[in-house]
Image (spheres, helix red, strand yellow):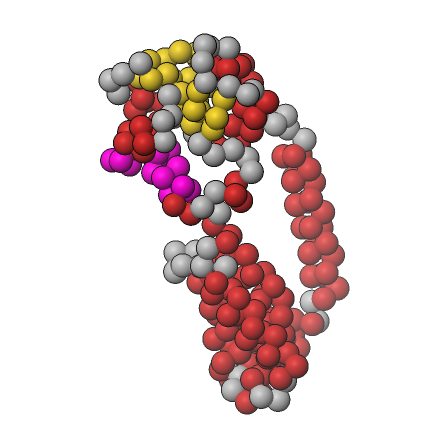
């Protein structure tokens, strides 16, 4: 889960958000770090927390923003004059910001009003109805939550994702990305059925792989069984 991992220099939110704020605070020197310890101490703790997990970036930004603004005022006095001029535009800026928020909320509402993507209920039922017990690998791990209602099905990863160790997650990602070891990983875990999206990279790879045959297909999903 990306938000639980340490940030990297490829993440825009870290490079363009967290690091500039931290730099602005450091530029303020004594004014931001020593004279405002009630603010700087939480900012330092949250910066350390951000280095351990990306999910803390927003909390750091909330605490760091006032200190960063003060640090920029110390090192770049011209910004203070620019800020005074900006206040003259408040009568226009505030309604514009409120309008932008309302339009964004309306757009998000329209997006959320769409029907959710279909679940592979029929595809998983087809596996459960075949004789014997089966170990099912789902290209989208949340799909395998449907399989929990069938006692004859075991899954590689299901929607209760927190319980799985990092090594299993890496093997799951390697498989859906069709890395060189994906066939061996399916064999090592005894997977005999794979549910994939129709036309996905994994489904195309399985179609070309010996000893795997297509056992079910509909408009959205396909199931492959090991011979």
Identify the image quadrant of residue 9.
Answer: bottom left
Identify the image quadrant of residue 67.
Answer: bottom right
Name the residue rendered at 47%, 50% in the picture.
2
Secondary structure character of the magenta stretch overall: helix
Give the vertical position of 98 relative to 108 (above or below). below
Q: Nearer the viewer, residue 87 or 185?
A: 185
Chain part drawn in magenta: 168-181
Q: Is residue 209 magenta?
A: no
Asked if residue 76 lies left or right of residue 90, the reply is left
- Residue 84 x/y as whole percent: 66, 77
Q: How many marks?
A: 0
Name the residue rendered at 59%, 22% in the picture.
149
Give the vertical position of 194 relative to 43 (above or below). above
Name the residue rendered at 65%, 34% in the picture.
112
Q: Nearer the viewer, residue 215 or 217?
A: 215
Residue 82 shows in this picture: no
Asked if residue 121 lies left or right of residue 137, the reply is right
- Residue 75 x/y as whole percent: 51, 84
Q: Nearer the viewer, residue 207 or 213?
A: 213
Residue 164 shows in this picture: yes
């Amino acid at each position: 889960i990306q938000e639980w991992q340490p940030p990297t220099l490829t993440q825009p939110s870290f490079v363009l958000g967290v690091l500039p704020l931290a730099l602005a605070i450091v530029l303020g020197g004594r004014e931001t770090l020593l004279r405002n310890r009630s603010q700087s101490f939480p900012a330092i703790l949250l910066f350390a927390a951000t280095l351990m997990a990306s999910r803390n970036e927003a909390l750091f930004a909330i605490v760091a923003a006032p200190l960063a603004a003060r640090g920029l005022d110390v090192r770049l006095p011209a910004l203070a004059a620019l800020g005074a001029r900006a206040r003259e535009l408040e009568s226009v800026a505030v309604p514009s910001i409120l309008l932008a928020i309302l339009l964004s909320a309306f757009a998000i509402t329209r997006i959320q009003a769409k029907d959710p993507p279909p679940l592979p209920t029929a595809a998983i039922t087809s596996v459960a109805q075949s004789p014997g017990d089966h170990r099912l690998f789902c290209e989208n791990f949340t799909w395998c939550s449907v399989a929990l209602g069938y006692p004859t099905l075991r899954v590689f990863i299901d929607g209760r994702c927190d319980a799985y160790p990092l090594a299993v997650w890496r093997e799951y990602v390697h498989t859906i990305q069709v890395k060189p070891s994906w066939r061996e990983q399916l064999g090592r875990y005894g997977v005999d059925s794979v549910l994939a999206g129709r036309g996905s990279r994994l489904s195309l790879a399985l179609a070309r792989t010996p000893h795997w045959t297509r056992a079910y297909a509909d408009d959205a999903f396909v199931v492959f069984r090991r011979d």
